[in-house]
Image (cartoon, rainbow, N blue to C red):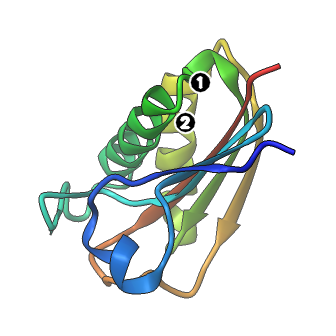
């Protein structure tokens, strides 16, 4: 059995809460939830579209470090605080994954760790 490979991004919460930015388990690459936090600061305040673009950028960077790409993505999840932001987040998803067309689930949540965060995303890739 091949052990899972863990990839860190150096984010402040990974060591504190004991998780990895991404885990490679066999042919699967699982990316933890990503928000629009860059350099410890929430980006694009009040802008769900650009927060989604930024969060997916962080997730795609983790995939790249795992040897995967956008084209390998088979599943995404969008967690949106405000139901009114579903359309903006969905358009951002389409902008990034339009040709790839992964399975996607969108979920409204009560809130995220920082109230300025509007969207959190997860990505799963498959490398046969």
Describe residue 2's horizontal placement relative to residue 53 as left or right: right
Q: In the figure, 9 relative to 61: above or below?
A: below
In the rendering, at what x and y percent does residue 54 appear?
A: 32, 44
The residue at the point 43 percent across, 31 percent down is 65
Tell me where residue 64 appears, x and y as whole percent: 45, 26
* Disc marking residue 71: none
| Residue sitting at the far right | 1
Query: Looking at the figure, which quarter contains the N terminus?
Result: top right
Relative to residue 126, is residue 79 drawn left or right?
left
Count of all numbered marks drawn on residues in the image: 2
Residue under the image location 63 percent in, 16 percent down: 71
Q: Are marks 1 and 2 in contact (CB under 8 Å)?
A: yes
Q: Secondary structure at mark 2?
A: helix
Q: Is residue 82 above or below residue 3?
A: below
Circle 2 packing at 10 Å, graded few (<14), some (14-19), many (20+), is many
Pick whichever, 70 or 94, lies toward us.
70
| 4 on left or right of 86 | right
Query: Which residue is drawn at the image coordinates 49% and 24% (left, top)?
Result: 95
Mark 1 burial class by Cα count in 10 Å: few <14, some 14-19, many 20+: some
Q: Secondary structure at mark 1?
A: helix
Mark 1 vs mark 2, CA separation in Å: 6 Å
Q: Residue furthest top?
A: 99
Task: Please indicate whether residue 40 sits to the left or right of residue 105 in the image.
Answer: left
Q: Residue 93 — which label?
A: 2
- Spot occupied by residue 19 in the image (x, y as percentages of width and height): 51, 71
Q: Is residue 113 above or below residue 36?
A: below
Q: Mark 1 sits on what residue?
A: 97
Q: Nearer the viewer, residue 32 or 79?
A: 32
């Amino acid at each position: 059995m091949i052990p899972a490979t863990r990839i860190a991004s150096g984010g402040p919460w990974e060591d504190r809460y004991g998780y990895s930015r991404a885990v490679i388990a066999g042919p699967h690459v699982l990316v933890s939830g990503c928000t629009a936090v860059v350099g410890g600061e929430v980006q694009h305040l009040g802008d769900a579209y650009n927060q989604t673009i930024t969060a997916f950028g962080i997730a795609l960077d983790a995939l790249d470090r795992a040897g995967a790409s956008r084209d390998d993505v088979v599943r995404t999840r969008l967690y949106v605080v405000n139901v009114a932001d579903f359309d903006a987040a969905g358009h951002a998803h389409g902008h990034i994954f339009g040709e790839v067309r992964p399975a996607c689930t969108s979920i409204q949540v009560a809130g995220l760790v920082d109230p300025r965060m509007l969207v959190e995303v997860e990505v799963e890739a498959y490398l046969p």
